Image: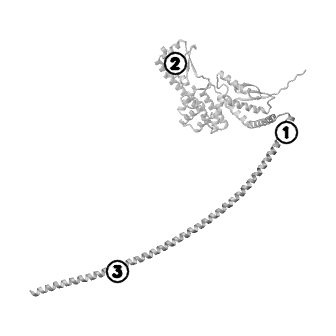
Amino acid sequence: MAPIVVEIIIAVVALAAGALIGYIYRKNVGEKAIGSAEQKAKNLILDAENKSETMRKEAILEAKEEAHRLRSEAERDARERRAEIQRSERRLIQKEESMDRKLENIEKKEESITQKEQAIINKQKDLDKVISKQLEELERISGYTIEEAKAILLSNIEKEVRRDASVMIKDIESKAKEEADKKAKYIITGAIQRCAADHVAESTVSVVALPNDEMKGRIIGREGRNIRAIETLTGVDLIIDDTPEAVILSGFDPVRREVARIALEKLIVDGRIHPARIEEMVEKAQREVNAIIKEEGEQATFEVGIHNLHPELIKLLGRLKYRTSYGQNVLKHSVEVAHLAGLMAGELGLDIKLAKRAGLLHDIGKALDHEVEGTHVDIGIDVLRKYKESEAVINGMAAHHGDYEPKSMEAVLIAAADALSAARPGARRETLDAYIKRLEKLEEIANTTPGVEKSFAIQAGREIRIIAKPDDVNDEEIVFLAREISKKIESELEYPGQIKVNVVRETRAVDYAK
């Protein structure tokens, strides 16, 4: 037992000694390691301090070098700017010196000019005195003042210029008319002769004949019921006055007036006049007038030889039967224009069908001008475009009064044919008072022109014959006189067609044998 304890004790002691030795060894090793680490740390810190010091010195050195470079550049720029400023100052000084020299020269020149001006003024005064004396001497010798001499000179020049102008105008007109006049006369007269159409002059009112005056009372009806019914249904005014056996129908719309006329005639024949019967007869008259309108439109297209017209255009053409212009039936006028335009187009080698079509439709707007705002030309353009007529036809219609520029020769022919149809003798009628006033105004325009002795309006106002004063107007000046009077007529007078101005100058010498 004792040996085991001893071994245990020895083992414990050995363990304790080993542990103490191990602790001492670890302590020594740890202290050596710590000392080595601290040394390394000190070395690293020392190296870092050395490196930082080196970098600091290098940075300071670089900064000094950069500062030196910048200072050198700044000094160089400053030197260059000072040199440039010095050069600029030298240039300014030179310019100022040059300006001073120029200013001195200018002042010298101004002084010289002033002296010369004064000398000129003095010479001008001397010349004015001399000229005044010469003019006085000339006036004394000639017996004319300056104004009188100017007037004589201007008068002589004016007469000379007028004479030359009249001769030139006469030559130009004769050359222009040499060929054109013959051809135009041939074409126009041929067309008029080949198209001899009859016209019926119609007024803006219609007159219905009555079998007796008692019928007026029946038309009026009890308390005016019948006449109010007629006026309401037709839109036409009935004028019942002292005219024996007649009733006057007045209305702006010729179609309405025709409906009223037919209805009233039917009522008079029937004898039964009361509101219900009036309404029935007005409806029948409307159907009858519509049939007549369609028939007249178709007849017009057949007469002219134009086909493929829109049915509505045919109806509008038929409405023109009841439309008049200055007493001329518009439908007959349109047919005549179509014939004239077609004949002239044939003579000139142009499109006959186009000319006839545009001529027939040239006044189509007048069928609606009572219902639609605008001129009959603008209305016609809208209507023809609505019913798909060609642009050539539309232009021919639009240009016949000069409202639009003609784009084809056919359009020019339409305008010429329209003027021919409207201006020919007997085509249109005027009231007697308007006719007399127009002729009096025509003669007045001619008589108030200097150089005219007397004038005569002839050919129903389509020609004025003027007798010139032979002492005031010579043979060359009568051309100028005729042109002057024609221009005055164009500006002061309204007339259909054209007016021929015929100036006659005659010098007679009368003596007696005793």
Distance between mark 1 and mark 2 Cα atoms: 100 Å
Where is residue 490 drawn, in percent x and y?
68, 31
51 vs 490, nearest the viewer: 51
Q: Amino acid under label 3?
A: Gln
Q: Amino acid under label 2?
A: Lys
454 vs 324, nearest the viewer: 454
Q: Quadrant of residue 86?
A: bottom right
- Give me the residue at 51% from left, 18% from top: 266
Disc 3 is placed on an element classified as: helix
Q: Is residue 271 visible from the viewing direction of this image?
A: no
Residue position marked by numbered label 3 in the rendering = 39
- Up the image or down, 274 lies above or below 446; here it is above
Decide if residue 224 is on the left or right side of residue 86. Answer: left
173 vs 73, nearest the viewer: 73
Residue position marked by numbered label 2 in the rendering = 266
Label 3 neighbourhood size at 10 Å, few (<14), some (14-19), many (20+)? few
Q: Nearer the viewer, mark 2 or mark 3?
A: 3
Q: Amino acid under label 1?
A: Lys
Distance between mark 2 and mark 3 Cα atoms: 148 Å
Disc 1 is placed on an element classified as: helix
- Give me the residue at 81% from left, 41% from top: 128
Decide if residue 176 is on the left or right side of residue 33. Answer: right
Residue that sits furthest to the bottom in the current view: 3
